[in-house]
Image (tube, rainbow, N blue to C red):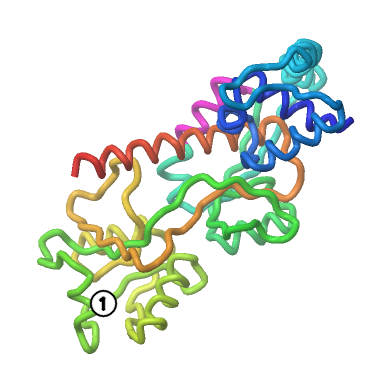
Amino acid sequence: MNIHHLELFYYVAKHGGIMEAVRNMPYGIQQPAVSGQIIQLEDNLGVKLFQRRPFALSPAGKRLYESIRPFFDNIEGICDQIRDGTSELIRLGAPKIVLDRYFPEIVRDLRETSPSVKLALREGHHHEVVERLLAEQIDLAISPIQETAPKGFEHTPLMEIQICLLVRRDSGITSLDHFWGQDRISEPLISLTPEETVTKQFVSFLEENELSWPPLIELSSLDLIERYVAKGIGVGLGIEALGGEAHPSIHRLPVKSIPPIRVGALWRHKLSSAGRRVVALCRRQAEELERQRAAAKGSA
């Protein structure tokens, strides 16, 4: 019997359904994967473990859950006893904007539940954190991801972010037509370096539409781009505001012809319990940012 299938069933039974289990698991896994592996468990046992809609454990499911619950309920405490107070190290890489704006809350929450965990946070661009994962210099990365993770990687999606052009509110520019209607775009463009996902996708969009707009200034972070735009130096290539953090002097123009950037947690090897907790906290914060974003759009 596959022990991982039992672990998945434990979370499904504990949280009252597959969708709820996926939201509360301490590591990333997609709903179809959970469904498929639970079906394998049921096939292996030759019984139905629960009714899907509405959720209800079968008599066999209740017996199995009561049998495995003591073990999985206490697994974290057992691991802490085995470590005997030694610190568990999590090495994480992420862009500067993630570590600056979003990670302090995650670290605070992690410290409340896992005070012995040691964190080594490394700032880096997308290609840099992926290289560090490959070199086993970090355990976990927050990075743009494709529809599927690169070969040899595992991932869980966190959120999608729209690419925007950033202009000063007093510039008089209220639409992207201001730029696309010019034979030669006159405003200076401020962007990240060419290997960054935001820049790559924008360049592809320009090429597809036979537009030319080479950046005049390349900067190392999205925060710096916002500062330069706020000073009136040019038009910035950036992302939408998240969590109500819009810069007061900047207006964002979403480039909806460009697919949103999918951001996720990425890793290579099986995560430790602390690593899974970090992923769960990242997912929880991403859900909160999504709620804030939806509320901001609703009040606009």
**Residue at x-position 34% and y-position 59%:** 224
| Residue 285 vertical position relative to residue 158 in the rendered view, above or below | above
| Residue 114 vertical position relative to residue 167 in the rendered view, above or below | above
From this viewpoint, is residue 77 visible?
Answer: no
Percent position of residue 243, x then y: 33, 40
Q: Residue 180: which quarter of the image?
A: bottom left
Q: Residue furthest right?
A: 1
Percent position of residue 4, x then y: 79, 32
Q: Residue 52: which quarter of the image?
A: top right
Indicate the quadrant containing the C terminus: top left, top right, bottom left or bottom right: top left
Q: Residue 73: which quarter of the image?
A: top right
111 left or right, relative to 174: right
- Helix, strand or loop: magenta stretch: helix
Question: Which of 12/61 is in front?
Answer: 61
Question: Which of 27/166 is in front?
Answer: 27
Percent position of residue 295, x then y: 28, 37
Indicate the quadrant containing the N terminus: top left, top right, bottom left or bottom right: top right
Amino acid on which disc 1 is placed:
Pro
Check disc 1 and report its element: helix, strand or loop: loop
23 left or right, relative to 193: right
Q: Which residue is mark 1?
A: 188
Which span of residues is magenta-colored? 104-115
Q: Is residue 53 magenta?
A: no
From this viewpoint, is residue 133 visible?
Answer: yes
| Residue 65 vertical position relative to residue 193 in the rendered view, above or below | above
| Residue 68 vertical position relative to residue 25 in the rendered view, above or below | above
163 left or right, relative to 144: left
